[in-house]
Image: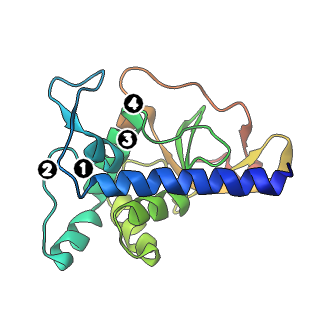
């Protein structure tokens, strides 16, 4: 088997799983107890991170609601604390670094929009709304931080840096040993 075959198979397998999860949205909710939950959650609410709050049905209201920074943050915290969102994986949109939680931009915003069936070109509006929360670490007037792969310093990753306390309490996952802050990203 070639590497391309395995890669194509893995993508197809992932797409099949995502499709199956999206199909759950059209079926009656199956209660599920999570490790930290006192009330049952549904598989779909864990996947989308919407909790038990119903989304507005009007498409315009739904879109505006989902583009709020607070809603995105709630989705992110829920998915990370329930370990539904991949962390520190080569294809992950979230990495744990010494300075905090590193969100790859615009990948994390596009993932959120895609999962909520919104146009991915709205990532700029969503990131602007998220920045208005002012919970991220900044470098002067710049929101994005740069990290690189230790084995490939030319491969630069841009993203938002969020303090641990905003996402995780009290347990913080392991730090990604393969990422290092770029020298231009050292000042805050």
State the SS at label 4: loop
Of pointers 1 and 4, the one earlier in the residue sequence: 1
Residue 156 placed where, x, y %? 74, 55
How far apart marks 2 and 4 lie (CA) works out to: 22 Å
Q: Which residue is mark 4?
A: 168
- For label 1, the residue is 50
Q: Are marks 2 and 1 in contact (CB under 8 Å)?
A: yes
Residue in the picture at 32% in, 51% down: 48
- Left or right of 18 on screen, residue 117: left
For the residues carrying marks 2 and 4, which lies nearer the camera in this image? 2
Front-most of residues 102 and 36: 36
Residue 187 at x, y percent in the picture = 64, 47
- Choose the circle earlier in sequence order: 4 or 3: 3
Which mark, by number, is residue 53?
2
Q: Measured from the top left, where is residue 186 in percent x and y?
A: 67, 45
Gap between marks 1 and 4, in whole Å? 18 Å
Choose between 156 and 185: the one closer to the eye.
156
Q: Earlier in the sequence, mark 2 or mark 4?
A: 2
Name the residue located 81 percent from the left edge and 57 percent from the top edge: 4
Kind of element beneath mark 3: helix
Q: CA distance from mark 2 to mark 1?
A: 6 Å
Quadrant assignment, res 72: bottom left
- SS at mark 1 in the image: loop
Q: Distance between the Cα atoms at labels 3 and 2?
A: 15 Å
The nearer-to-camera label among 4 and 3 is 3
- Residue at disc 2, secondary structure: loop
Which residue is denoted by mark 3 in the rendering?
79
Q: Classify residue 83 as left or right of residue 133.
A: right
Tell me which residue sits at (16%, 73%) in the image.
Answer: 61
Marks 1/3: CA–CA distance? 9 Å
Foreground mark, 1 or 4, reads: 1
Give the quarter of the image for residue 171: top left
């Amino acid at each position: 088997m070639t590497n391309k075959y395995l890669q194509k198979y893995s993508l197809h397998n992932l797409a099949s799983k995502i499709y199956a999860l999206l199909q759950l949205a059209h079926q009656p909710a199956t209660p599920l107890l999570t490790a930290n939950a006192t009330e049952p959650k549904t598989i779909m609410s864990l996947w989308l991170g919407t909790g038990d709050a119903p989304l507005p049905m009007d498409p315009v209201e739904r879109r505006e609601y989902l583009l709020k920074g607070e809603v995105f943050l709630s989705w992110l915290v829920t998915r990370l604390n329930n370990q539904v969102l991949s962390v520190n994986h080569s294809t992950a949109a979230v990495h744990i670094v010494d300075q905090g939680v590193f969100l790859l931009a615009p990948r994390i915003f596009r993932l959120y929009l895609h999962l909520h069936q919104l146009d991915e070109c709205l990532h700029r509006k969503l990131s602007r709304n998220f920045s208005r929360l002012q919970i991220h670490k900044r470098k002067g007037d710049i929101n994005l931080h740069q990290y690189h792969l230790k084995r490939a310093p030319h491969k630069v990753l841009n993203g938002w840096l969020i303090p641990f306390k905003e996402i995780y309490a009290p347990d913080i996952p392991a730090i990604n040993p393969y990422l290092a802050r770029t020298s231009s990203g050292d000042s805050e």
